[in-house]
Image (cartoon, rainbow, N blue to C red):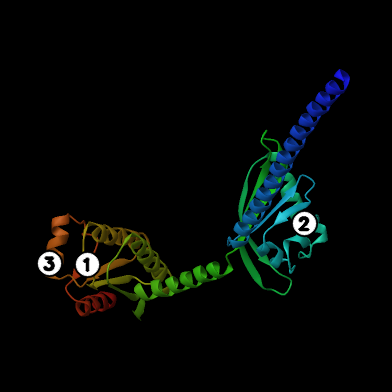
């Protein structure tokens, strides 16, 4: 009887241990399930974030095998989903001829150097079309700091570049309009200035004036400031520099459009205008220049 009681107690103890182990296993399995669920949610969330960004994003391992990318990167390759990129190298993807080799060389060099590689790329395609990209590549590192792969992003900025080029062309046209040069007689040119004159426009005005003197073999250059509302130290300095530069070419500046208030301002500013002939109006300046040309 005593042995039966002892055996029953042992079974109960063993059952208790087994129940505890089963409970621990259930908790462990639940923790694993939760961890897997969280990891899956994190993966989905991160993929959603990557797909939302305006950049194409991708990452590779040290062997330059793609481990992931966002939807924009896959679409640029003409592929439906990122899954069609994962597991491939650039050689297996539909890049333009020579691009796969170039990408691999850049990636390997970056892995060796451990340095980020930002760049602007201008790509001309076989059909003559062209695009511009802002790219950024960086080495991927593990928690110990060892390089385990490559992260890359790029954005197509072709529309912005073309807009900038259009703005530059328009600025050039406006600059030509804002600093016109008019040859009105043999050896005589006129530059009428209108509006405000900042440092950039002053430099351009002097450059246009000097080029015009050289091109037209001018001996007299009339600079008319009738349309310049404000003559400050900056404008006075520009006029002096222009006269000095013109003199080096063997020509002379005639300054016209000197209103009483401008004359007073120039005197108060101490502008050294002795190297220039001044007249109150453009007509008087032209008459002087034509008369001096005949003498």
The image quadrant of residue 16 is: top right
For mark 3, does the 10 Å Cα neighbourhood hold few (<14), some (14 to 19), or many (20 or more) residues?
A: few
Outermost residue on the front side: it is 1
Tag 2 near tag 1, CB within 8 Å: no
Separation of residues labelled 3 and 2 (CA atoms): 75 Å
Q: Dot 1: what SS?
A: strand
Point out residue 125 in the picture as x, y percentages from the top left corner: 71, 69
Q: Dot 2: what SS?
A: loop
Tag 3 near tag 2, CB within 8 Å: no
Q: Nearer the viewer, mark 3 or mark 2?
A: 2
Residue 217 in sight from this viewpoint:
no
Instruction: Indicate whether 66 appears above or below 201.
Output: above
Q: At 54% across and 71% down in the image, what residue appears?
A: 162
Q: Quadrant of the C terminus?
A: bottom left
Q: Dot 3: what SS?
A: helix
Q: At 35% across and 66% down in the image, what residue appears?
A: 205
Residue 283 in sight from this viewpoint:
yes
- Compare marks 3 and 2 and give the one earlier in the sequence: 2
Asked whether 137 or 32 is in front, the reply is: 32
Which residue, given by chain and number where applicable, does mark 2 sit on? Answer: 86
Which residue, given by chain and number where applicable, does mark 1 sit on? Answer: 277
Q: Nearer the viewer, mark 3 or mark 1?
A: 3
For mark 1, does the 10 Å Cα neighbourhood hold few (<14), some (14 to 19), or many (20 or more) residues?
A: some
Separation of residues labelled 2 and 1 (CA atoms): 77 Å
- Compare marks 3 and 1 and give the one earlier in the sequence: 3
- Compare marks 2 and 1 and give the one earlier in the sequence: 2
Q: Which mark is residue 73?
A: none
Point out residue 29 in the picture as x, y percentages from the top left corner: 74, 42
Which residue, given by chain and number where applicable, does mark 3 sit on? Answer: 261
């Amino acid at each position: 009887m005593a042995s039966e009681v002892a055996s029953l107690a042992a079974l109960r103890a063993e059952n208790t241990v087994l129940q505890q182990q089963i409970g621990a296993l259930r908790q462990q399995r639940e923790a694993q399930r939760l961890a897997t669920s969280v990891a899956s949610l994190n993966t989905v969330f991160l993929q959603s974030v990557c797909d939302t960004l305006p950049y194409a994003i991708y990452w590779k391992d040290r062997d330059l095998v793609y481990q992931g990318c966002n939807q924009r990167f896959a679409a640029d390759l003409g592929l439906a989903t990122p899954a069609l990129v994962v597991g491939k190298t650039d050689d297996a993807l539909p890049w333009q001829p020579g691009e796969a080799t170039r990408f691999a060389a850049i990636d390997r060099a970056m892995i060796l150097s451990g340095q980020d590689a930002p760049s602007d790329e201008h790509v001309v395609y076989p059909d003559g079309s062209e695009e511009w990209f802002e790219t950024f590549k960086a080495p991927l590192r593990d928690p110990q700091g060892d390089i385990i792969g490559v992260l890359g992003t790029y954005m197509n900025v072709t529309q912005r570049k073309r807009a900038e080029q259009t703005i530059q062309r328009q600025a050039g046209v406006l600059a030509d309009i804002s600093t016109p040069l008019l040859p009105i007689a043999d050896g005589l040119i006129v530059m009428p200035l209108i509006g405000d004159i900042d440092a950039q426009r002053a430099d351009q005005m002097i450059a246009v004036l000097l080029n015009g003197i050289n091109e037209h073999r001018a001996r007299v250059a009339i600079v008319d400031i009738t349309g310049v509302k404000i003559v400050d130290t900056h404008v006075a300095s520009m006029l002096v520099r222009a006269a000095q530069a013109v003199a080096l070419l063997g020509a002379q500046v005639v300054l016209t459009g000197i209103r009483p208030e401008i004359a007073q301002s120039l005197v108060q500013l101490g502008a050294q205008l002795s190297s220039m002939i001044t007249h109150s109006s453009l007509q008087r300046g032209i008459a002087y220049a034509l008369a001096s040309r005949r003498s």
